[in-house]
Image (spheres, rainbow, N blue to C red):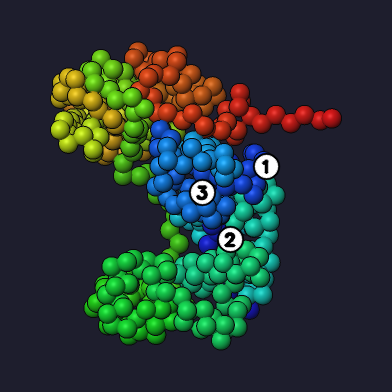
Amino acid sequence: MSKHLLALVDVNSFYVSCERAFDPTLEGRPVLVLSNNDGCAVAMSAEAKELGITVGAPWFKLAPNAQRHGLVARSSNYELYGDMSHRFLQVIGEHSHEVEKYSIDEAFAGYGGPLQGAGPWAERIRRDIAERLSLPVGIGVGATKTLAKLANLAAKRVPGMRGVCVWDGLDAEYRDWVMSRLPVQQIWGVGPRSAKKLAAHGVTTAAALRDADAQFVRRLLGVTMMRTVLELRGQPCIQLEEEREFRDSLVFSRSFSTPVSTREIMAQVMASYAQRACTRLNSRSTEAKTLTAWAMTSQFNSAAEDSPSATLSLPAPTNDPVLLTRAAQALLPRMTEGTRYTKAGITLTDLSPRGAQPAFDLFAEPQQDKGIGPLLQQVREKSGTDAIGMGRGGMRTAAEWEMRREMMSPRYTTRWQEMLEVHAR
């Protein structure tokens, strides 16, 4: 008999796994992926965690002992990670018509076959991702999203499950045993504050939350937590959602490796950022009506704290790099010359599908050449982000303020010049 189930497919240590997929010498070694400007650890392998390294650990403190521990650091390679995430979703989509991207390394997928076939189906997904992308994943299958999340924990933590757990396929007594020992805070959607309130009423485990009075939980923590209770009982309350085609906003921001303190250099920054944001708009076939350009000083520089911003409403929605670059320059008069700004960005809001504006609008100013934005996108996709730009945004060499990534691996899947080379003997 067929049963509709949901699977949560989750890549283990995603950033590190992406690095290992193209560099097998990293297998079994402690590996870190660092934040912008190689500041601190944002992801780590199991071997790095065994050394006591935690998220946020500053690299300058770890570097002196890295060689002694065999510790390997990599700068964040978001272009590689984003492309691998896209490929990960494509593989899952070949096994299910219902796929929801939950995060860069997680996705829900629907299964509608017999219960006894759920395990082999999940194993095929796991094997396919491993063989085609060299990414290790854990897969939890359950009647609800919450149970799929819970099963995913078991798939990763119980060695005998070998990366796949079908919750409904487990013995009922074993399921009760697991839930009676799982802290309530480890349930999807239960944060520290909610866990504290639940603990005050004796609800400290997953089993206790499952068996709690649903209406009482609703009065205590709202309808969302009541849905969690029902989902733990196997009653679906949180449906799969298709990713919205047009997001509410687009942000392009970076921290500087060297502070920017003059309007002349900030004009270069704004031109570069506006054109890169334009490329993203074109890749999504969207246009923006409102642009906000902003900058900020370091949070540790209380003596000269400053965070100027400028917001402009454009005459009509656009993804034209000339108009967006010009609009971004509105930030410059609001800067304080000589102040050391450490981060800046551009936020585009009021997004709409390209061409959604009526063809005849008396109040809209004439648009620039519509071919410039797509042209920039095509050249950058083929030759790299820094291959082309206009005016101050057309720098041939990296600027001093550009984000520092001194230990970044090649962008194997998105740059022809950086593709992995294989030689036959």
Instruction: Calculate the distance from the C-alpha at mark 2 to the C-alpha at mark 1.
Output: 20 Å
Task: Please report the residue visible at 62 percent of the width from the left and 63 percent of the height from the top.
Answer: 163
Instruction: Calculate the distance from the C-alpha at mark 1 to the C-alpha at mark 3.
Output: 16 Å
Q: Earlier in the sequence, mark 3 or mark 2?
A: 3
**Residue corresponding to mark 1:** 24
Looking at the rendered structure, the kind of residue marked 1 is Pro
Residue 183 seen in render: yes
Q: Earlier in the sequence, mark 2 or mark 1?
A: 1
The spot of residue 159 in percent (x, y) is 63, 67
**Residue corresponding to mark 3:** 44
Residue 138: numbered disc: 2
The spot of residue 286 in percent (x, y) is 37, 36
SS at circle 3: strand
SS at circle 2: strand
Looking at the rendered structure, the kind of residue marked 2 is Gly
Q: Give the image quarter of residue 185.
A: bottom left
Instruction: Calculate the distance from the C-alpha at mark 3 to the C-alpha at mark 2.
Output: 17 Å
Q: Quadrant of the N terminus?
A: bottom right
